[in-house]
Image: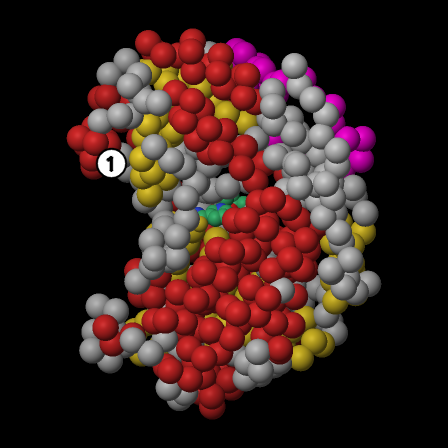
């Protein structure tokens, strides 16, 4: 029998929300030329703030500021000096971690427990890690005298707003580049708080510039003639459009795109542990995770047992207010994303898969979707092929390791995979066979700044994180 938890709300009072925000250019907050847009809380639809939309001229101002900072200050500063700024930023992130976590949960809809225990500690860890590289670049394995590229244009999505910012900004700055970053339209607030942190750290003006806005702002940044590097994380569709648009130039590009990862459970796996990994793999961050384990492959002999335990575990997930510390599953980030999840799950049913969700009451306001699994899924179903980017798991079965590999690799993507088994030799064999940038063994969705991350095939190219993540920002 379940029991009720008393609410354990994290206070919003640590966050000083302004009613409107401008762009961050050349070390200052300035008004945008375009019309402003609203950022809403996905959990309540409350308007959190009005945000300026950068147009072509604003983007140009930001790129010019980054260029000046690059030539006059940042690229001529010693690595040890740059490191001091990065360490300072990392320490301020730790000091202001509660504020950052609350704002991230409010603006994105993710549970405070995740923002507090995963996102923000990792953000600080990435800055600490890359701060350590800033004065050791000649030992990174990219030549004896690696040089920065110049001005980096960076575009990030809404699922891990601060963490994706850290993955982009920390290595770029450590390597001596300056940046113009565009956050996603629905989640700009923590990037703007990060801009305040840059001011607090006395980062020289123009080293970091933040231009807010929709896809058109991203397009203006991509099309700017004076950028030396383009780094994009987002959907495969937009990634392809960006790759096409810069194909004629020599601008180096890294693309971190979508995924449809297989989470593979063998019959010798510790089943309870695997069930925790399945839940974490697909319901962490409401399934808004590029490397989510959205295709579960279960060995036939343990299928009934795994399914029964998975359903029992899903029935204990608590959905609701992202600021409640008891919450396991928060809100879907936007009404558009919710509509896409509804569309694809309806397709799953019409194609003949069987849908199941635990009984749960959805709040009346806001954007919500109950954790859902589909059984009886075939490889041809759209829910087995397309990224849903929501709390929806497609379950398939296999009999032999070879069949598991074949099914796992039968996807246009190749970002991540999970393997659950007692046998070390099988883990190594599977890791060699799987066409995925990351393979987790007996765990899932683990991140570490020292470890490279990135995909094969339509999941993109280039790596972020670790020593490899520096390469994208160095000429050698
Ligand atoms: P997108 O719609 O592709 O948006 C990503 C970013 O690009 C946003 O800032 C977006 O601005 C901007 N953008 C949109 N159209 C653009 C254009 N034509 N030119 C330049 N920029 C443009 O993706 P999303 O829905 O925000 O994010 C979800 C996707 O990101 C998923 O497919 C997920 O798998 C992927 N993702 C991948 C990874 C890695 S590491 N591989 C990590 C996280 C997420 P607006 O938001 O204002 O439209």
Q: Quadrant of residue 204?
A: bottom right
The quarter of the picture where the N terminus appears is top right
Q: Residue 395: x, y in percent?
A: 45, 19
* Residue matched to label 1: 431
The residue nearer to you, when weighing 57 against 32, is 32
Q: Can residue 341 be seen in this view?
A: yes
Q: Which residue is drawn at the image coordinates 74% and 74% (left, top)? A: 31
Label 1 within 8 A of ligand 1 by Cβ: no
Q: Residue 263: x, y in percent?
A: 38, 29
- How has the structure been colored for display? secondary structure
**110 lies above or below 358:** below
Q: In which quarter of the image is residue 311?
A: top right
Magenta stretch in the rendered image: 340-368
Q: Which residue is drawn at the image coordinates 65% and 36% (left, top)? A: 327
The quarter of the picture where the C terminus appears is bottom left
The residue nearer to you, when weighing 84 against 169, is 84
SS at mark 1 in the image: helix
In screen coordinates, is 63 left or right of 258? right
Q: Residue 66: x, y in percent?
A: 52, 79
Q: Which residue is drawn at the image coordinates 41% and 48% (left, top)? A: 447
In screen coordinates, is 141 left or right of 2? left
Q: Is residue 407 visible?
A: no
Magenta stretch: includes residue 410: no
Q: Which residue is drawn at the image coordinates 62% and 18% (left, top)? A: 358
Magenta stretch: includes residue 355: yes
Q: Residue 143: x, y in percent?
A: 21, 74
The residue nearer to you, when weighing 435 against 119, is 119
């Amino acid at each position: 029998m379940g029991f009720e938890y008393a609410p354990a709300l994290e206070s919003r009072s640590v966050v000083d929300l302004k009613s409107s925000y401008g762009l961050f250019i050349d070390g200052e907050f300035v008004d945008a030329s375009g019309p402003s847009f609203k950022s809403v809380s996905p959990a309540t639809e409350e308007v959190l703030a009005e945000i300026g939309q950068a147009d072509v001229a604003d983007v140009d101002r930001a790129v010019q500021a980054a260029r000046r900072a690059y030539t006059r200050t940042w690229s001529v500063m010693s690595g040890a000096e740059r490191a001091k700024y990065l360490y300072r930023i990392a320490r301020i992130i730790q000091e202001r971690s509660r504020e950052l976590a609350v704002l991230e949960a409010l603006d994105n809809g993710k549970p405070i427990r995740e923002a507090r225990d995963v996102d923000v500690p990792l953000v600080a860890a990435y800055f600490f890690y890359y701060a350590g590289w800033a004065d050791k670049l000649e030992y990174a394995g990219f030549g004896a005298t690696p040089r920065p590229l110049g001005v980096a244009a960076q575009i990030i999505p809404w699922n891990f707003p601060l963490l994706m910012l850290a993955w982009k900004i920390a290595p770029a700055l450590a390597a001596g580049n300056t940046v113009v970053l565009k956050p996603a339209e629905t989640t700009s607030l923590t990037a703007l708080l990060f801009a305040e942190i840059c001011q607090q750290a006395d980062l020289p003006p123009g080293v970091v510039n933040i231009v807010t806005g929709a896809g058109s702002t991203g397009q203006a940044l991509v099309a700017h003639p004076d950028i030396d590097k383009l780094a994009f994380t987002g959907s495969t569709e937009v990634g392809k459009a960006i790759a096409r648009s810069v194909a004629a130039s020599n601008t180096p590009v890294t693309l971190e795109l979508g995924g449809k990862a297989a989470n593979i459970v063998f019959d010798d796996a510790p089943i309870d542990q695997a069930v925790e990994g399945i839940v974490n793999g697909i319901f962490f961050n409401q399934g808004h995770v590029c490397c989510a384990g959205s295709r579960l492959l279960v060995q036939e002999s343990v299928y009934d047992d795994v399914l029964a335990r998975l359903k029992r575990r899903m029935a204990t997930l608590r959905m609701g207010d992202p600021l409640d510390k008891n919450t396991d599953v928060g809100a879907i980030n936007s009404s558009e994303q919710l509509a896409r999840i509804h569309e694809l799950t309806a397709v799953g049913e019409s194609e003949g898969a069987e849908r199941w969700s635990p009984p749960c009451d959805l709040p009346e306001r806001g954007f919500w979707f109950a954790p859902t699994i589909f059984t009886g899924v075939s490889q041809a179903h759209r829910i087995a092929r397309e990224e849903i980017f929501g709390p929806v798991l497609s379950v398939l079965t296999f009999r032999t390791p070879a069949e598991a590999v074949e099914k796992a690799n039968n996807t246009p993507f190749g970002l991540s995979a999970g393997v659950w088994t007692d046998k070390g030799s099988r883990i190594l064999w599977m890791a060699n066979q799987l066409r995925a940038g990351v393979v987790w063994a007996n765990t899932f969705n683990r991140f570490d700044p020292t470890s490279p991350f990135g995909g094969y095939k339509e999941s993109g190219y280039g790596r972020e994180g670790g020593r490899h993540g520096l390469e994208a920002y160095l000429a050698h």
